Image (cartoon, grey):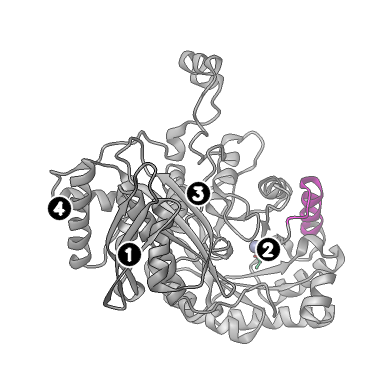
Amino acid sequence: MKDRLVIFDTTLRDGEQSPGASMTKEEKIRVARQLEKMRVDVIEAGFAAASPGDFEAIRAIAETIKESTVCSLARANEKDIQRAGEAIQPAAKKRIHTFIATSPIHMEKKLRMTPDQVVEQAVKAIGWARQYTDDVEFSAEDAGRSELDFLCRIFEAVIKAGATTINVPDTVGYNFPSQFAETIRQLIERVPNSDKVVWSVHCHNDLGLAVANSLSAVLAGARQVECTINGLGERAGNASLEEVVMAVRTRPDIFPVETRIETTQIVPASKLVSQITGYPVQPNKAIVGANAFAHESGIHQDGVLKHRETYEIMRAEDVGWTQNKLVLGKHSGRNAFKSRLAELGIVLESEEALNSAFARFKELADKKHEIFDEDLHALISDEAVTPAQEHYKLNYSQVCSETGEVPHSRVILSVGGQELKAESDGSGPVDATFKAIEQVVRSGSELLLYSVNAITTGTDAQGEVTVRLSKGGRVVNGQGADTDIVVASAKAYLNALNKLHSCQGKVNPQGDV
Ligand code: KIV
Ligand code: ZN
């Protein structure tokens, strides 16, 4: 019998801390449903005290998710823990994850607390958290640069106070696999009652070692790994869920553990998160990159045709890669559309939302003829934008682009319900359109990123555009999809402007106590 490795997904919390990756409540619910379908054990749904929006999103996830444990992060103070407890309250299975920094540099420079005060605060935090749930996780932030003796001391104290999972984060991605494994081994050996808790790791990827460090920790006795889809997360990101899960599954000879992850849901989860956050997946990314199972060299192709295992250690279909299947066309009816959405795990809350999505599907099918799953995901993302989130809307766009002539764009926007027109030249049709939009909106934002990807193959594919804008220290990503990439670009730009318009301030969990 192998031990269970608990998969704790923090895409919706640490992943969302990636610049511009903030998600709306509806988007978070879609990701959470996909994580549940993938049989993730624990979903860290957010940081309840960060903002009212985060609180609402966690609560909505707690009301929706039945199979996975729903968790909220909380700093080790009473107010944060109370918010976390209230947010997860409706969940069938609930956890509070509380943390405080333990490295000398964090305690002295950030918290301005003595080690004694830190231990005292951590113990109190566990007591507050236990009022809301018996499932309490404690993290020693920056454990990767903390003193081992101090870690033993604080972990002993929080276990005594009722913590049930002890997490050892390499917050700044500084550790090295053999060293990190030794830390975990020592902690399990030295901390009294270490066998009464689950040992967990949370590794960042600053040196590209997050997955390696997490896996070495598993070999040293850790039984929970905290990770994110596509390795999303602060700075260089977190350990990537798909790599951890597939390493354990592909090498049962090495790992004495197994996960309960439904691996065929990995690629759909990766695509969903990439599409919602606007963070593209690099083509050569392990498991979920477009080339992860593509054999380019003739020798490899020949080998795979003769015997697949000559060059493949995993099967593409086991992680959810399928051929781009034609799923629907312009003659497909409302029922076919509805059941395909259900198969994709997409639930539209009302008949009205379904009717509106179906009308847009018909419009798209007129332009595109063959509709793939990826098109449906993009369409539903557009549909998830509520009127309240759509202060700026594109009503009309026209572009003149001719060889030897300066491109010119005309747009009509609805701004808070009022129709406004503008036009502008630009160095290209997209530039002209963005300038025309700016004439109306005058956002004063800075464009940090503009990228276009084809959602499927063929020249009739929809272009999916990501626009990243920054203003007053806030960074947002906007997405838009259309068969016309100028229209997709305008939609993405307006989507980002809408996010800037509606965004409320957030507290960074790793800022203070
Ligand atoms: O990286 C980190 O230390 C964290 C903690 C809050 C677990 O994200
Ligand atoms: Zn982290």
**Residue type of the residue flagged with mark 1:** Ala
Magenta stretch encompasses residue 336: no
Residue picked out by circle 1:
384
Residue picked out by circle 3:
280
Q: Residue at x 30, y 47 (%)?
A: 483
Closer mark to the observer between disc 4 and disc 3: 3
Q: Residues within 10 Å of mark 1 (few under 14, many from 20)?
A: some
Query: Where in the image, quadrant-wise, is ligand 1 located?
Result: bottom right
The label on residue 209 is none
The answer to the question of whether label 3 and label 2 lie on touching residues, with beta carbons closer than 8 A, is: no
Residue picked out by circle 4:
334
**Relative to residue 239, is residue 443 depicted above or below?**
below
**Relative to residue 82, is residue 150 depicted above or below?**
above
Residue 168, position in %: x, y?
71, 61
The answer to the question of whether label 4 and label 2 lie on touching residues, with beta carbons closer than 8 A, is: no
What's the CA distance linking mark 1 and mark 4?
Answer: 19 Å
Give the mark, 1 or 4, whose residue is nearer the N terminus: 4
**Dividing the image into 4 quarters, which one contains the C terminus?**
bottom right
Residue picked out by circle 2:
167
Closer mark to the observer between disc 1 and disc 2: 1
Q: Which residues are magenta?
A: 173-188
- Image quadrant where residue 439 sits: bottom left
Q: Secondary structure at mark 3?
A: loop
